[in-house]
Image (cartoon, rainbow, N blue to C red):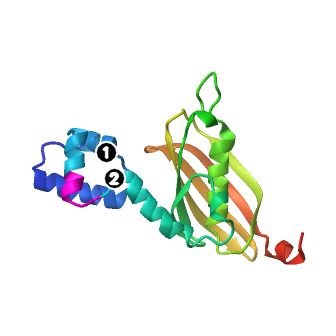
Amino acid sequence: MVKNLSKKERQKVLQKKIRENPFLIDRELAEIFDVSIQTIRLDRLELNIPEVRKRTKNLAKQAYSKVKSISGCEIIGKLVDIELNNSGISILETNEDMVLEKTKIVRGHHIFAQANSLAVAILDIDAALTGSAKTKFKRPVYVGERLIAEATVNNIRGDKFRVKVKTRVNQEEVFSGKFLVFSGEKLSKEGH
């Protein structure tokens, strides 16, 4: 928490925080600076910093244009950053349709699907198939929580890619997965 800064100092730190993590929402920023949400909104307006939805949308446009291995509609969540054969980030806003009715816990296949589609999307190949996945769910995810998945390519050997994905809610890791992905280009060309 950053307290007792002058307006000018707060705005300078605010710009830095948003550069470091463009997915911070106004409520989270207000908690960081120990000010009201309205103060954060006014600071953003003065600094011409768009709200998180617009920041995310701008990042997503850039990211989707780079994807080769699957179509954009096959990506679970919103792709917001990608560096082919290196890394990527996606965001999934959870909702009532994704949860177990009784507990309001998000079903694991939604969390897995976000991670798996991100692991495939960051690869610089025309077609990709997941060969295996080793996953770990670290805590339940509840309706309304925002999942931020970050993927990194750990190893490339010929047509095999090892991709690691970590998913978090705020700063808490809730899921991790190690994916072995194969280039499906040979299968695509053979018509299978």
- Mark 1 or 2, which is nearer the eye? 2
State the image quarter where residue 67 is shown. Answer: bottom right
Dot 1 crowding, Cα within 10 Å, few <14, some 14–19, many 20+: some
Q: Is residue 180 above or below residue 113?
A: below
Say which residue appears at 32% left-offset and 40% top-offset: 27
Quadrant in the picture for residue 143? top right
- Of the numbered discs 1 and 2, the one sitting upstream in the chain is 1
Q: Residue 1 at x, y = what percent?
A: 25, 42
Name the quarter where the C terminus is drawn: bottom right
**Residue at position x 18%, y 55% in the image:** 11
Tell me the residue at 73%/64% (across/down).
181
Q: Which mark is residue 26?
A: 1
Q: Callout 2 environment at 10 Å: few (<14), some (14 to 19), or many (20+)? A: some
**Residue 88 placement (x, y as % from top left):** 54, 63
Q: Is 46 covered by the magenta stretch?
A: yes
Name the residue carrying label 2.
51
Secondary element type, mark 1: helix
For this view, does 72 lie left or right of residue 129? left
Q: CA distance from mark 1 to mark 2?
A: 8 Å
- Residue 180 in picture, x, y percent from top left: 73, 61
Residue 148 percent coordinates (x, y): 51, 50
Looking at the rendering, the stretch of residues picked out in magenta corresponds to 43-49
The residue at the far top in this view is 102
Which kind of residue does numbered mark 1 sit on?
Asp
